[in-house]
Amino acid sequence: MPKIAVTGKGGVGKTTLSALLAFTYAEQGANVLAVDADPSPCLAEALGFPAKLTANLTPIAQMEELILERTGARPGAAGGYFKLNPRVDDLPDRFSVSHRGIRLLELGAVELGGSGCICPESAMLKALVTHLMLYRDDVLIMDMYAGVEHLGRATAAAVDAMIVVAEPGKRSLGTAAQIASLAQDIGVKDLYLVGNKMRSETDVAFLNEHGPDLPVLGALHATPAVVEADVKGLPVYDAVPEMAAAAREIVARLGQRLDNSGAEEDSP
Ligand SMILES: Nc1ncnc2c1ncn2[C@@H]1O[C@H](COP(=O)(O)OP(=O)(O)O)[C@@H](O)[C@H]1O
Ligand SMILES: [Mg+2]
């Protein structure tokens, strides 16, 4: 069951792609855990979760009492003593909601002042993300917001695929290259590129030529239908068949890649 992290510059389409991937795996019969790591969560909407369900969903980072109970300190209490490895194994099932075969968990916002900020809520999220990567047997799709800061080294090594989403354009590709390099620094091995908002074959060629040197899993077209679906509150997967088809191709290509790398590891 692949553990997939989706990254990229703000607005490139991480949430759109995460939702598309989640629906694709769910349709194939997998148990999917979708994790929203954006401080302003919006994956629930992209997945078409009914408001009645999401009303009960609180981002983990905002659960003060829970964080106190598990780490021994209140969120925001820097400098005190708290557990760096709080118990988290019960959280994914307790604090997520499920719809159409997709379980959704929201991580929430953590102050990440400076490098290596250590506070109770960040310790909690790190422990949780590590648990999700290493000890659960569902397909994990993590919508990573902009950075890779929720990933410690141990966790980074457990990511089966980090997908960097990029739009045509030098800035988006520059950010993609930066993210790829940071991710490699913390030990993510399998990075891939997905293009989004491609207007023409020229854009696809531009991506291939100027993008970071990563395998390209696919490229999604720019289409007003995606924005319309957004406006109507419909999942792109339901409303735009072309996007659903492209997502299936991406999942198929990723599957081949992962099978191959698995085979390589197995051989002597
Ligand atoms: N292929 C596409 N064609 C047209 N608009 C798109 C496409 N993909 C995403 N968008 C739009 O771009 C905006 C940002 O997408 P989103 O998935 O929220 O990005 P991110 O999560 O990276 O910030 C949204 O309004 C979305 O509807
Ligand atoms: Mg997003």
Image (cartoon, rainbow, N blue to C red):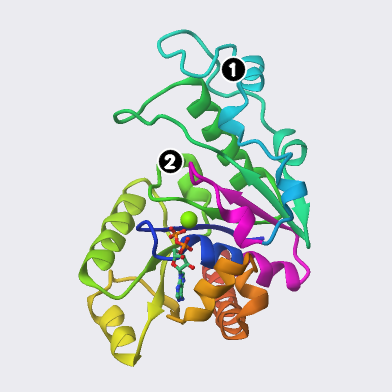
Q: Is residue 260 visible?
A: no
Q: Which residue is mark 2?
A: 153
Residue at x 57%, y 86% (from the top left corner): 242
Magenta region:
20-47
Query: As displayed, is residue 266 above or below residue 181?
Result: below
Task: Say which element carries label 1.
Answer: helix
- Name the one closer to the observer, 18 or 50: 50
Q: Along the line of sight, which residue is nearer the eye, 101 or 132?
A: 101
Image location of residue 147, percent across then percent down: 38, 47
Is disc 2 in contact with disc 1, using a CB cutoff of under 8 Å? Answer: no
Query: Tag on residue 11?
Result: none
Residue located 52% across and 25% down the image: 121
Q: Is residue 254 left or right of residue 193?
A: right
The image shows residue 181, relative to residue 215, as above or below, that is: above
Report the residue at 41% width, 29% height from top: 111
Quarter of the rendering containing residue 27: bottom right
**Is residue 30 on the magenta stretch?**
yes
Seen as rendered, the residue at the extreme bottom is 201
Q: Quadrant of the N terminus?
A: bottom right
Q: Is mark 1 within 8 Å of ligand 2?
A: no
Secondary structure of the residue carrying tag 2 is helix
Mark linked to residue 71: 1
Determine the residue located farthest toward the front in the rendered image.
232
- Tell me where residue 82 appears, x and y as whole percent: 53, 13
Residue 201 belongs to magenta span: no
Please tell me which of labels 2 and 1 falls first in the chain. 1
Question: Looking at this view, is 149 or 145 the one in front?
Answer: 145
Residue at 64 percent of width and 74 percent of height: 237
Residue 70: x and y in percent read 64, 19
Residue 131 visible: yes
- Residue 254: x %, y % from top left: 54, 73
For residue 10, what is the image quadrant? bottom left
